[in-house]
Image (tube, rainbow, N blue to C red):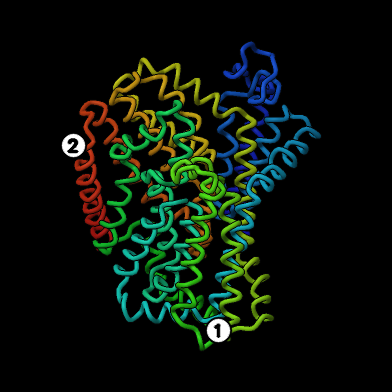
Amino acid sequence: MAKTNKIVLAIAAVVIIALLVVAYVTGGAMGTVDCPDCAVAGTECETCGGAGEVVGTYWALIPPFIAIALALITKEVYSSLFIGIGVAGILAANFSVTGTIDTIINDGLISAVSGTAGIFVFLVELGIMVALINRAGGSAAFGNWAKKHVKTKVGASLATFVLGVLIFIDDYFNCLTVGSVMRPVTDKNNVSRAKLAYLIDATAAPICMIAPISSWAAAVASYAPEGEGLKLFIQAIPFNFYSLLTFVFVIAIVLMKFDFGPMKKAEMNAKADLEALVEEANAKESPKGKVIDLVLPIVVLIAVCVFALVYNGGILDGVSFVDAFANTDATVGLPWGGLIALIFTIVFFICRGIIDLKESMDCIPKGFNAMVPAILILTFATGLKNMTGLLGTKYYVGNLMSSNAEALSIFLPAVIFLVACVLAFATGTSWGTFGILIPIVTVIFPEGSTLLTIGMSACLAGAVCGDHCSPISDTTIMSSAGAQCEHVQHVSTQLPYAITVAAISFVCYILAGFIQNAWIVLPIGAVLTVATLFVIKMVTAKKAD
């Protein structure tokens, strides 16, 4: 371990111990707030696990911030996440040794594995498919085709962006599919894996958040008042400044051929870094591979997974397409579709005579091994989310929002955006964030008002923004997996980009509170985005000189 990392870990250990001592001295649970789902404090309910009271103070945000800070500083994500889980376990168990271990194992890690088992299965299925396609020579053939037709970094980046926008059904599916398809194209054109991961992440959640037919729209609709969910979601789309301005930002930065921050270094080193990776991937590929060997399995995967999602939602029982998405469960539908696509791919390659059954079976452990880092990070990140939930984060944020609503008045959309950003960043979940805030937003603003629409969009945009920035977000983790990029590098390279768009979005929500017209504020935001990039480009150029 480097000397700097040792010093950082030593300082972190002292800070964590000091925080725990303060927490213990100030009363163990640091004060509690009544669970809003309990009629009377002390009664039993499903929400708070029968305790009637929860730890609902700012201490609930400390463990995820410790984990995130350590990950960004030390560049070591596994130990950082586990330390966060451990701190949360100590606080949740009220400093009981046996209680802490029970909480970490049962409520943290075991719940994380059982709750995301379907996604783990889909990750492994996709990893095996990628290994099969590589072994069959499909990736090399597609890369050679792309080299003839997509000849520039700009073209490769824009193609990745367009494909990400087209796959708007589900963010998990988006991350992994776009990475598998576009990796050969971006590799051939010397687009760094970090840049590919950013392009995937910048389209996955943002496009789902503005697509009326998506798993995200269904989730939002379920949290809003009955019968009003989809209507509010559609009305909020023009005001979803973070998602829309992220698209403007990506297109502008690609066309300007400009990068800044850690991403600039990653792009400068891309050619040297990718040469070794591409040579290793091509070493055992079949010379018989054709473009169809990549395209057909991916097309089948997309088609079957879309059907699986709506099938799981009950479309064969007479439910409409939109309602089927509202009722579906991606953790069941995606592995369902992935298994069929995987079997099809194996049979197809054997029938084509490019690989035999033994070679196909050899790809199974290879594909699984490729996904182990993503599975481990997802397990720890989900465990940390579970532990944060035990500490009552949603109650603390909910009480904070409700108590300050009247005082904030016209600035409330901008404040909602910030609160949603912080909450999603700390917990790593956008769905959990808008699940907490949407009921509060619908109570704060008058029914049918434009401010309700703006507040709703601010909540959704902030959730996407925080999720986009957070190292413990499942979408961020899967973007790293899809691009086969080191996770900490992906987070550190995309943070300056996401924060830039977030700052512009915050300004737009302040303007929206006064103007209350998306078709005026949105063009202003687009101009601000492009102007900001030109300013950054000039400043960085002067520093380089």
Residue 154's place in the image compared with 8, above or below, is below
Residue 353's place in the image compared with 528, above or below, is below
Specify whether residue 69 is in view.
Answer: no
In the picture provided, is 422 more to the left or to the right than 280?
left
**Residue 202 point in image, percent of width and height:** 39, 53
Q: Is 140 in front, or is 383?
A: 140
Name the amino acid, label 2.
Ile
| Residue 352 marker | 1
Q: Element type at marker 2?
A: helix
- In which image quadrant can residue 359 be found? bottom right
Instruction: Using the numbered discs, state the Cα–Cα distance from disc 2 to disc 1 in whole angstroms.
Output: 56 Å
Residue in the image at 51% along x and 70% along y: 297
Q: Element type at marker 1?
A: helix
Residue in the image at 47% along x and 21% along y: 400
Q: Bin the neighbour count of mark 2 within 10 Å (Cα to Cα): few under 14, some 14-19, many 20 and up.
A: few
Task: Name the residue at the bottom extreme.
Answer: 287
Name the amino acid, label 1.
Arg
Q: Is 428 in front, or is 149?
A: 149
Q: Quadrant of the N terminus?
A: bottom right
Specify whether residue 205 is in view.
Answer: yes
Residue in the image at 19% along x and 46% along y: 527
**Residue 241 point in image, percent of width and height:** 31, 40
**Residue 515 point in image, percent of width and height:** 20, 28
Q: Is 183 in front, or is 472?
A: 183
Q: What residue would you read off at disc 2?
A: 520
